[in-house]
Image (spheres, rainbow, N blue to C red):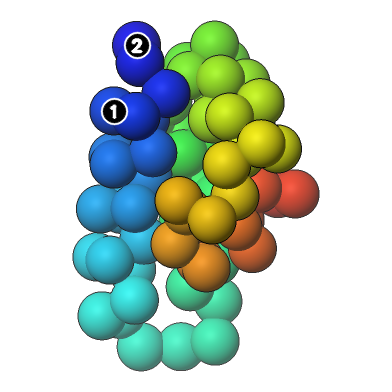
Amino acid sequence: MSPDKLTRMANQIATFFRTQPGPDQAERVAGHLNDYWGPEMRAELKAHAEAHADELDDLVKRALPLI
């Protein structure tokens, strides 16, 4: 899957969890990615994030270490 699509999908997930109450939104994003994305997708997102972190929602950035 293209890095752009992974970024867009991860940002959409972050947008959803931003609407949920509680201080653990980044943990919920990480939980979703760990539960529903395959290892290859997670690895591609992390690799893309190293060079293009500015494209990621802040919740995704905070979730990355938990993936």
Image coords of residue 45 (percent x, y):
54, 30
Relative to the observer, which residue lies in front, 13 or 22? Answer: 13
Circle 1 SS class: helix
The three-letter amino acid code for the residue at tag 1 is Lys
Q: Which mark is residue 5?
A: 1
Looking at the image, residue 67 sits to the left or right of residue 24; the answer is right
Res 67 seen here: no
Q: Residue at x 51, y 66 (%)?
A: 59
Q: Residue at x 34, y 11 (%)?
A: 1
Q: Are marks 1 and 2 in contact (CB under 8 Å)?
A: yes
- At a point 55% along the width and 76% down the height, the residue shown is 24
Q: Which residue is mark 2?
A: 1
What distance separates the C-alpha of mark 1 from that of mark 2?
7 Å
Q: Which mark is residue 47?
A: none
- x, y percentage for residue 29? 46, 56
Can you give x and y, in whole percent of width and height, for residue 10 in the image? Answer: 37, 45
Q: Quadrant of residue 44?
A: top right
